[in-house]
Amino acid sequence: MPGLVPTARPKPLLRGEGRVRRPLSGKSIRDRGERQSRLRLPGWQDAQHSSRDGVLQRPFRFHRAEAFMMKIIKGDLIKLALDGHFDVIVHGCNCQCTMGAGIAKTIKEVFPEAYAADLSTPKGSREKLGSISAATVTRAGQQITIVNGYTQFHWRGAGVLVDYAAVRTVMKQVKLRFAERRIGYPRIGAGLAKGDWTLIAQIIDAELEEEDHTLVEYLA
């Protein structure tokens, strides 16, 4: 598929016969046909799901904190969104209403509506940290929502510029407003903002638990 290069996927936690499983939350997950895990640890829960033919399948176990994890692919996030792979894309912004570098600059050029949403917020306000602005656009007959997440105050300065607490609050809002949609994002806060991606990835995984979310590592 053009523009979409899969990398190693996280090891699935639900194992069985390749059937669709339904955790207690009501969301479905598809296991990968591996041997069912019999390990029981604190935090694991049992559940059962009737198949379409009405036959009750064997109980399975899942860990609610890890059942839905970040997918990782290589490609061009914006192209993938335009090609219909994502309903929502999220990127990190500063609070200065610039969008003048990195993927923010490309988003500004391709989706001027997203930049207009950024300009509608107060320039230089620290109160924006952890908030979001968004624009929903139509391209080639499909809707894409671009989320500007305010994860750093300024683009200038030495040291780490990303605000980890702001990343967490941004992702909480993304989950609240865009649940059950296909969400894509770059390495938010770990490029020009010089943040620790390992820590940021853990924050994203925790806050977007049970959502379909994907890290797109840039591949020209």
Image (cartoon, rainbow, N blue to C red):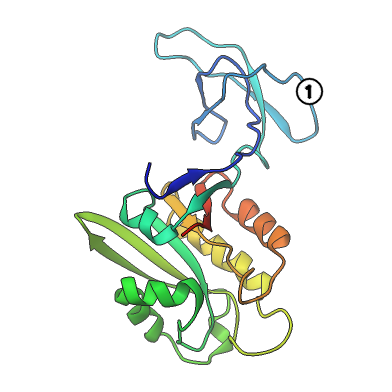
Residue displayed at 52% across by 51% down: 74
Q: Residue at x 69, y 55 (%)?
A: 202
Residue 22: x and y in percent read 52, 27
Report if residue 179 is visible in the image: yes
Q: Is residue 22 above or below residue 169?
A: above
The amino acid beneath tag 1 is: Leu
78 vs 92, left or right, is left
Q: Position of residue 174 (x, y in %)?
A: 49, 60
Q: Residues within 10 Å of mark 1 (few under 14, many from 20)?
A: few
Mark 1 lies on residue: 39
Residue 190 sits in quarter: bottom right
What element does badge 1 sit on?
Answer: loop
Report the residue at 52% width, 92% height from top. Answer: 124
| Residue 201 shown left or right of residue 38 in the figure | left
How far across and how far down the image is residue 178, in percent? 43, 56
Going by the picture, which residue comes out furthest to the left? Answer: 141
- Say which of 128 and 95 sits in front: 95
Q: Position of residue 184 (x, y in %)?
A: 47, 55
Q: Is residue 158 above or below residue 35?
A: below
Residue toward you, 4 or 35? 4
Say which residue appears at 56% left-offset and 25% top-offset: 31
* Any part of residue 149 in sight: no
